[in-house]
Amino acid sequence: MSRDASVTLDWADGEHHFRLGWGEIAKLQEAVDAGPYYLLQQIYAGHWRVEHLSNIIRLGLVGGGMVPVDALKLVRSYVESRPPMENLQTAIAILAAGCMGAPDEEIVKKKRKPATGSMTSRAARSDSAKSTGPAQP
């Protein structure tokens, strides 16, 4: 499985799937006038605005497969009508997954082929005469 920028979280009225793909990140940049990683840094530094949180969560729900109208209703009920700090960690988790992939996603590594052939060096297998004689005692 490849990293698809999604994360599933217990939030609001149950478990929800969030994803900030390329299109959602472009919409987020337009809405908040900042790039995703810059915005993430600003949030970590405490320089965020309430609309940052609501846009991240709403677009994450839409990217995760929710109908936009339903996402807007949830955001109005569980973000815009609640204290901002209640949703700060959720917004961080969604945006971080969008920027870097979710930390619990399995990274598939290609298996290396086992070495084939002899472990003897090419020089040792050669039929050529040695260029130097044995060391003298």
Image (cartoon, rainbow, N blue to C red):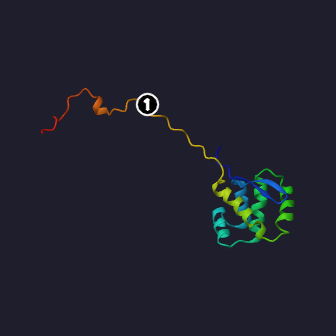
Q: Position of residue 85 (x, y in %)?
A: 76, 70
Give the labeled residue for mark 1.
116
Above or below — where is 31 with respect to 46?
Answer: above
x 27%, y 28%: residue: 126
Above or below — where is 113 with respect to 97?
Answer: above
Label 1 is placed on what type of residue? Thr
Above or below — where is 86 with respect to 130?
Answer: below
Q: Residues within 10 Å of mark 1 (few under 14, many from 20)?
A: few
Q: Position of residue 111 (x, y in %)?
A: 54, 38
For mark 1, give the secondary structure.
loop
Q: Which quadrant: the C terminus?
A: top left
Above or below — where is 115 with respect to 24?
Answer: above
Q: Position of residue 117 (x, y in %)?
A: 40, 29
Image-based side of 2 in relation to 129, left or right: right
Image-based side of 38 in relation to 15, left or right: left
Q: Which quadrant: the N terminus?
A: top right
Residue 9 or 92: which is nearer the viewer?
9
Q: Quadrant of residue 24?
A: bottom right
Residue extending farthest to the left is 137
